[in-house]
Image (spheres, rainbow, N blue to C red):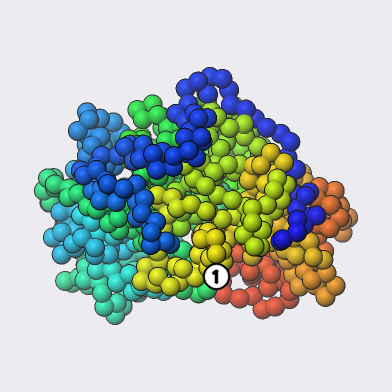
Amino acid sequence: MTEQSPALDNLLTESRTFPPSEDFASRANATADWYAKGDEDRDAFWAEQAHRLHWDTEWSQVVDWSDAPFAKWFVGGKLNVAYNCVDRHVEAGHGDQVAIHWVGEPGDTRDLTYADLKREVSKAANALLSLGVSANDRVAIQLQMVPEAIVAMLACARIGALHSVVFGGFSPSALRQRVDDAEAKVVITSDGQYRRGKAAPMKANVDEALEGAESVEKVLVVRRTGDDLDAEVPWTEGRDVWWHELVDGQSEEHTPEAFDSEHPLYILYTSGTTGKPKGILHTSGGYLTQAAYTHNAVFDHKPGEDVYWCTADIGWVTGHSYIVYGPLANRATQVVYEGTPNTPHEGRHWEIVQKYKVSIYYTAPTLIRTFMKWGADIPAKYDLSSLRVLGSVGEPINPEAWMWYRENIGAERCPIVDTWWQTETGAIMISPLPGVTSTKPGSAQRPLPGISAKVVDDKGDEVGKGGGGYLVLDKPWPAMLRGIWGDNERYRDTYWSRFADQGYYFAGDGAKYDADGDVWLLGRVDDVMNISGHRISTTEVESALVSHPTVAEAAVVGATDPTTGQGIVAFVILRGGAEGGGDEAIQELRNHVAKEIGPIAKPRQIMVVPELPKTRSGKIMRRLLRDVAENREVGDVTTLADSSVMDLISSGLKTGG
Ligand code: WTA
């Protein structure tokens, strides 16, 4: 990558831009001068952001980077994270404001005001204390999207215990691995969860996971599915406690203690390139500062006016930073939905937007493309006029999906913020600012005020406009991970060794600057293909494929090729679930890609498939597709949301030739 690859020149040439409306700009929270402020005096900028929070003790130093890559932010400051997210809003007279409009999958609903939340969190904190949990202990939480999940997280924060939330769909062995690694003392779960209209057991899986788990003393069980669950809820006397039996009877009074700014807040596991998940460690003051700042600036959130909805699951970092900590610190009123987007029908999200007058909607490209597949006539049936800001996160959003989102959900009026960040960064790093930035379909555009990021070549030198390479973060930021739980060496190795000389954090993503200097994310570098010495992003070819009217979704991998090094193999789902894809149609798609990007990007092979293999967080598992493309036996499928997908793909290919 020292030399600019010619292929990168052609990538994502996007000339459409959408400036903010004057009306939006005149009322926007963030203003253009913030960029200069952030550059000129980074410490002063972040100090100002930290004043969004209530500190029991003011800090003496904004950042201490003397022990890099181990950062300390707001050194000497003390605060309570839960107090900041709950109590202070009640004390300021907003106790009656709805914090959470909760919508259950079967259609039951529950509204919690900030006063309700304060009571529930205080009781849960007292309950945890009664179970022997104290500051610095770890509590594992495997819960679906019920209010108790949020209450449990805040209760941990309130008493200084670390939560480790494990996605509800994770297998018993995945849960066990995480419980053991963090040596969790208490596990919080539920009897069962509703999934596509049916009650499925949850506690039974947790029990399977915990067999012989030495650290676990108590299991706290939320009753959710109750009698709807066919199976008996397995119970271990002396260890298991019903949430309602323990929590409901607790005192509503709990005085929050102020903890050090660097007191650990949570561990969240994320998969790395090796088998063992990494326990990403986040701490209190810096994390909450950046979560609150970004939620305010990027979504233009106005407390008491907006209704905010982030569709992520609490099991992922997006749920942590943009359902729990950021929005609640900013006194948001938000929707929390328990179920899947097509239960009981494909208009469920839009029905919810209409009912609660959602004004800020934050979701993932994979879901946007799913909505595209279902058809624009579905959202068209609902009143979406309350929407004013749309967000995207999790993977590069292809311009086609971006435009569909803008036209069919945003009525060509709502700014779209494509937000780049990671579990490790803790909060949004690169994103347009609505009201400031003229947005471009497919580009995350610019590091936020106060944040510094660069695209560099192999040697760590910044590339020029139009150049491509690696995305690095060259300055510490408040919400940055403080390490990998129990493994400082892995922390250094994974993130800080690639550009050790420069002291850059390497994010693992490929990126390029366009002619304006805006950043385009090109996917993980391991997903960048090398065809005849030319680098081509899988994302770019996917984007080209999806821009063809017959294609609903596409995944591209680089398969070993004796002549060209790698050859491009594409898997496509056709619109309307069409089985089709005769030779002629496939030829047309290949030509279409060649036309969009250049002949170098023409896929060697295109296979029409009914589904794509995705992780539970919606990421396409290219590794498995590479196995198919290279005629290997398909590898480990345990992290797939639906493990039968690979059989479906393989059998379809055999019969379909
Ligand atoms: C990818 C999710 C392009 C990226 C918050 C990153 C994105 C990884 C974007 C982190 C985006 C996330 N554009 N790529 N807007 N957002 N990614 O830890 O590859 O689940 O490294 O955090 O997702 O995924 P994670």
Q: Is residue 390 visible?
A: no
Query: Can you give x and y, in whole percent of width and height, for residue 285 in the image?
Result: 31, 48
Residue in the image at 73% along x and 66% along y: 558
Q: Residues within 10 Å of mark 1 (few under 14, many from 20)?
A: few
Between 224 and 558, the one lying in front of the other is 558
Q: Is residue 93 left or right of residue 163?
A: left
Residue in the image at 74% along x and 69% along y: 559
Residue in the image at 60% along x and 64% along y: 621
Query: Can you give x and y, in whole percent of width and height, for residue 586 in the image?
Result: 83, 56
Per the image, the residue denoted by label 1 is 273
Q: Is residue 329 above or below residue 241?
A: above
Q: Is residue 586 left or right of residue 294?
A: right
Give the SS element for disc 1.
Answer: loop
Residue in the image at 75% along x and 43% along y: 13
Q: Is residue 162 left or right of residue 648?
A: left
Query: Can you give x and y, in whole percent of width and height, for residue 226 in the image?
Result: 29, 56
Query: Quarter of the image containing the N terminus?
Result: bottom right
